[in-house]
Amino acid sequence: MKNSSWTYARKISQSFCLAVFLWLFLQTEYRGIDQLPYPVSLLFRIDPLAALADFLAPGPFGWQILWPALLILLGTVLFGRFFCGWICPLGSTLDGLGKVIGRGRRTFSPGWRRVKYYLLIGLGTATLFGVQLLGLFDPLAIFLRSLTLAVYPAYNYGLNRVFDFFYEHNVPLLSATVKNSYPFFRDNLMAFHQPIFALGLFTLIIFLTILLLEKVEHRFWCKNLCPLGGLLGLCSRYAILQRTPQKLCADCKSCDSLCRSGAVRSSGHMRSECLLCMDCTGFCPEERVHFGLRTGSDHYVGVDLQRRGVLTAMASGVMMAPAVRIGPVTHEQNPYLIRPPGAVAEDEFLQRCVRCAECMKVCIGRTLQPALLQAGPVGLWTPLVVPRIGYCEYNCTLCGQVCPTGAIAPLKLPEKKKNVIGLAVIKKDRCLPFAKGVECLVCEEHCPTGEKAIVMEEKELLVDGEIRRLKFPRVIDKLCIGCGICETKCPVEGASAVRIINEGESRRKRSELLAGPYG
Amino acid sequence: MTGIDRRTFIRQSIRTAVASSAVGCLPALDLLALPAIAADSPPLAVRKGKNIKQLVKETIGALGGIEQFVTPGEVVVIKPNIGWDRTVELAANTHPEVVKTLVELCLDAGAKQVRIFDRTCNDERRCYTQSGIRSAVEGLKSDRVSLEYMDRRAYKELAIKGGKAFDRWEFYMPVIEADRLINVPIAKHHSISKLTLGMKNLMGVIGGNRGRLHHQIAESLADIASVIHTDLTVIDATRILVANGPQGGRTEDVRNTETLIASPDMVAADAFATTLFGLKPEDVSTVVAAAQRGLGVMDLKQVRMV
């Protein structure tokens, strides 16, 4: 297959964008500066689907953050789905790995193409009615989430094992070289702490499934399933970029089998399906294909969105809200449902969070973990504070800095230090002084608030028939912010003797607080 | 030749055995502690002053200079307290100027390499930066100095001979293998061991679940100190934390004492530091346990003030 200069330009753009996103991904880490110097969440700032989620969520639209997404939309209206062909990192990954995986050439019934539109319409309607699940299917969220929760941790693990092997075994010639290269990898290309995520394997399986769909059909995901592709497709209806010839040529029909998005039909060029990869300008044996600004006649050919299908998708979206609301209120059912500092109230949080995992990537305490069902079925992949794995670092405000949709508000450090995400509760049946009659103060020692939220009080306790004077920890509720370091560091094996619960959190409505004992 | 007969020999042996075991049973007489009393009186230098650089030089100078402890070509480990994500004025970490001056002295004495690290409680990147120690050390611009993050692979489980709380623990091998160890804690309040000083600072070079040490803090720290040999202890009391220790967080809890304590005997240095808090060495159980084990001298009358 011959490549045109357009194809080369497109490949360079794809490689460049992918490299920038991967570089930003690596920069989504604390590197000694409290304020991240790069716009690490750029990927979502140019994501029209994230902008749609934000637009439909309660509260004002985040113009300051999300204006680049509107530029992409504007560009799409003018030129078509250039984003899918030239920028999208998931699309580029599929193009790049397609050769490795092996490409299927099956053609599916054209009805499959409607799925992405129905998905977009259904999810969009649901968002309008208060249940936002766009992030589950957003290609950029899928890409970053898979990278954060699965690919990067696995890559780190593998590299660490290699370096460890050469650290422990002295292999002639090799060991010295590997050892010398270690500092460079450690400081630039690896995570500071090995990332650990509860849903790593699950996320990986989904990512691999999307990659393996290439075996079925080239860009299966983009053609048939991607709701962002659907949104961009809808926007490109009046694009001024026109392909000539518009139809398959009677004498050749190469485009029918070679076009990766199957956008050229005998009825015409399907603008909303064309990824603008420009390959056809190269592989056309007669060099007939050209792209240019629309002149004169244009016969629009699109996917036939059947009225019945659209209505069904909308109805499903409308039904989703009551279906979710009939469940019990999750944060009342699950006292361990703790959200990062700055998180907006739970209902709004679920509507804003696009499950991109940026916050989990940047969290230096490794406390932010993806939820499976802890926040209800619609809370899948939303960030949870899991203090037994890690704690919320007292002087850190990174998660709010990277959140692209305002689900976690950026807090200034003094505000963050007062933001209550939960409350420590001492389990007397596990806590060493209470349960075993021996000294311990680890929770008090690590408590970071200036005036400690955990204090030690000396009392007498009868242990094995003798009276011992021991110090017992007690939580001062009004000083505790729920950072969870006490739970992380508690030396009791297995479950901690201090647990953080979501009582008294700042993000609940004031009235609720005033009614309770924490007003 | 007038030898003793078999009968007398057996009788005398039994008598000696009974007598010595009876004496050994008495809790007051710890046979292991005996060498401590017999040891030479260790030198202890205490100086006061506002200029930290000068203060460090004077205090070390009083002990005969850093050359007493570091000889050319040696690998020196300096172990400050960098445990917390706190700024200098909150007195949770060793003062960066104290660390920097000690490094300079070691370099001047011809040390081949000076390594600095701590197993921190908060995120190590934050602690190293926020404590001011990173910028102080990097400001020296010497390739013989390195402020390092602890390498998770370099811990090794070692046997603790005569350990009372533990018979094995994981230790950080670069400390064990270094030619010299200079322990540079900051004097602070602590709610179980009352104070954290030189012995407590050594918790920063061990691995494992350190929280477990608090069940028997005194004996545990003595166990650790019996494995790690310290050549010099310099206690930073330029400002001390008198409450809400060991990480503080409020300037109200900080007292400016402008003092530096140095001694090759860690126990003696710790013992003296207790007096800054209005305590006596015997009030702090870790000091007592270490002295009983013969790890140093806690009786301030037996030390040689220089």
Image (spheres, coloured by chain):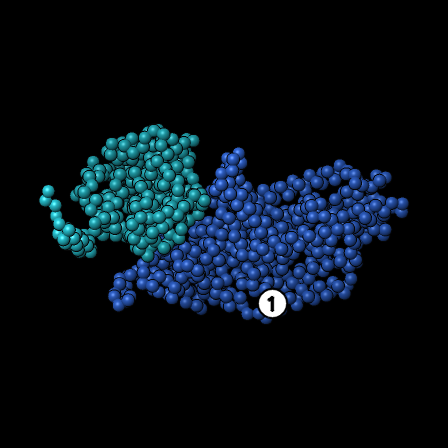
Chain colours: A blue, B cyan
Residue drawn at x 26%, y 45% is: B295
> In the displayed structure, does residue B3 sit left or right of residue A45?
left
Q: Nearer the viewer, residue A17 or A459?
A: A459
- Tell me, yes or no, if residue A333 can be seen here: yes
For mark 1, what is the residue? A324
The total number of labels drawn is: 1
Residue drawn at x 21%, y 51% is: B30
Q: Position of residue A373 (x, y in %)?
A: 56, 63
Q: Quadrant of the C terminus of chain B?
A: top left
- Tell me, yes or no, if residue B287 can be seen here: no
Q: Position of residue B20 (x, y in %)?
A: 17, 52
> In the displayed structure, does residue A35 sit left or right of residue A213?
left
Q: Position of residue A153 (x, y in %)?
A: 55, 49
In the displayed image of the protein, which residue is found farthest to the right? A251
> In the displayed structure, does residue B188 sit left or right of residue A34?
left
Amino acid, disc 1: Val
Q: Nearer the viewer, residue A513 or A111?
A: A111
Q: Position of residue A462 (x, y in %)?
A: 28, 67
